[in-house]
Structures are given as C-alpha cells and as structure tokens.
Image (cartoon, rainbow, N blue to C red):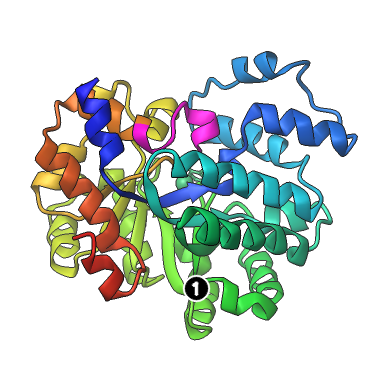
Amino acid sequence: SELKNIIQGIPKTELHLHLEGSFEPELMFEIAKRNNIPLDYESVNALKKAYKFNNLQEFLDIYYLGAKVLIYEQDFFDLTWAYLTKVHSQNVVHVEVFFDPQTHTERGVPFNVVINGIKKALEKGKEELNISYKLIMSYLRHLSEDDAFKTLEEALPFKHWIDGVGLDSSEVGNPPSKFINVFEASAKQGFKLVAHAGEEGPVEYIWEALDLLKIDRIDHGNRCLDDDKLVQKLIQDKTALTLCPLSNLELKVIQNMEDHNIVEILDRGIVATINSDDPAYFGGYMNENYYETAKALKLNTTHLKQLAINGFEASWLPLEDKEKHI
Ligand code: ADE
Ligand code: ZN
C-alpha cells in the first residue's frame, strides 16, 4: 500500500528495543535444541499461542523463560544479528538497544559472554549494514538496588562499550526511587541514563525518574498527559518519550490502537518517538509499529516524518550525524 511504502521510505531510528524481546520463536527453538535445553512448549506454534498477555507481568514471565536458552557468546551474537538484519530491511539506520545482564548472570552466564556476543553483532551491523548503534545496560527493577550495583561493577571492564543504563521489568511497586544511588553511581561513570516510567505505573514514577534518577529520556511515559505541569517540563527540557504502540496494545496499556495518546503527545509539542520494545512478542518491528499507529490514528505524512525526525533528535548520535536526518 501507499502508506507502507511511505513508512518504508523514511530512514528511522529505534531507541527502545530489548534484545531479549527480539528473540523470535524459530531462533529460540534452534538455540534450545543446540544447547540441549528443554522448552516448555512443544513447537513454535504452541509457543506463539502463549503470546497473549493481560498485563506487563504476564509478558515478563514468558520473556524471562525464553531468555533461558541463551548460554554461549554465539547465542547472543545470533540474537542480535537476527534483529539487525530484520530492521535493516525496514530502513532503520540507527539503533539504541537494551540488554538485561541480570537475566543471564543470575543463571550463571558470565557478563563478558553476554556482552561479547552482542558487541560483535553490533560491530558487524555497523560494517556490513551501515547501522550505527548505542548499547544500553538495563537494571531489573524487581531485583534489589544492591543487585544493580553488582551489575554496575561487572560492567565496568566493558564501560567503553556501554553508552547508557536503563531500568526495566515490573514497574508497579518498584518505583525509580528504589534506584537513586545506583543511578547516581552510573552517572559518575559517565553513562547516560534512561528509565521505563509511566507504562503501567503512575505519573509520579515519571517525576521520580526525572527528579531523582536525573534521566535524559523516558521509556514509554504514556501517563504523562495526566499532569499538565509534567507536560510543560517535558516540552521545556525537550525530554523525549520512547513510545511503543504495539507493546501498549499487547500489554493492555490501551484497549484499542485508536485509544493511543501519541497524537495528543505529539501535538502538545513533546518529543515523541515510535519504537517496538519487544517485537518478537508483540507482533511487529518498526514498520509495523508505524503502520498500525498511522492506520488507527489516521496520521498524515507530516506526523510520520516528525516521528522519525524526533527519533534522530532524541538519539545519542553526535550533532553532525543528527543533522543529516533532521
Ligand atoms: N522488559 C522488556 N520489555 C519491557 C517493558 N515493556 N516494560 C518493562 N520491562 C520490559
Ligand atoms: Zn521496554
């Protein structure tokens, strides 16, 4: 269709993507088999049938199960490379991707194994696909701040490979305030800071992420329109939101795509971006997220281009690289 062609034609960034969430069932089965790890599901189709979620936690339970088959450097390489080739086909030219070290180190997979596999694939993507990248290490918020501190320690030998730290996993009951000290320590190491906030959690969590964690960018942030003072602050500080429309639909943050508030967020002048979050679980990568949003909310080409420009604006690319796309 014409809309699909327009979306394909726009060079895009992806700023909110969990590598473990890009783990397609087919690759999961392949890696499970070669690592001799049993999966709870009999086939790719049986697994796909389980991808029906009523909330974030139901998704996370299955997402952590899937990640358990990742053991060797080659596994993390294959995971990352599959993601990069997929988004390359969708005209994504810059990515800032999350990985969750604790999901793996908790199971005895060494930090260096995880990051070496990811880094090799990212470098190959830069060389062969011309995709620039940043890497973000995300702390799991259902675990303790002490645990996050241990992860920060383990990351330090690889500091030059890691651009930022984030905060993900179960939001409600694990407010940003739980991680003030480790975010402060991370900032001192020179890492940029982001956090998931206001996905399922209340608008207060967005305030905490900004005021207490001092983050540069908000992951999700759907609830921001609940508070006019917050909206004013986001506009003034040009703080970007990395929204994930298909994720919101699949995790029942919204009931219908028509209910998504992204147009209102954009029209208020907030730097909103579109991203895929966990594309293997939510039924779409970047183009599908743009397409479903555009179709449901009747976005025009100006909106679409603004969203893509916002992605470059909100990225951590150097100014001269941003300017090529803005
Ligand atoms: N981990 C992976 N995807 C996530 C999301 N959408 N929210 C919180 N944690 C996550
Ligand atoms: Zn996310």
Counting from the top left corner in percent of width and height, residue 13 is at 35, 52
- Residue lying at the far right in this picture: please name it: 36
Residue at x 13% of width, y 37% of height: 301
**Image quadrant in which you'd find residue 280:** top right
Q: Residue under circle 1?
A: 183
Say if residue 138 shows up in the picture. Answer: no
Count the marks: how many?
1
Q: Nearer the viewer, residue 112 or 269?
A: 112
Please report the residue visible at 39 percent of the width from the left and 45 percent of the height from the top.
Answer: 201
What amino acid type is highlighted by mark number 1? Phe
Instruction: Tell me the magenta residue range.
Output: 278-287
Is 219 inside the magenta-drawn segment? no
Let me know if residue 285 is in the magenta part.
Answer: yes
Question: Is residue 49 or residue 123 the one in the foreground?
Answer: 123
Q: Residues within 10 Å of mark 1 (few under 14, many from 20)?
A: many
Query: Magenta region's main secondary structure?
Result: helix
Q: Nearer the viewer, residue 80 or 144?
A: 80
Height in image: 28 above or below 151?
above
Q: Where does the N terminus fall, quadrant-wise? A: top left
Residue 196 position within the rendered picture, expressed as x and y whole percent measured from the top left: 43, 53
In the depicted structure, whether residue 174 falls above or below residue 300? below
Residue 134 image point, x, y percent? 48, 64
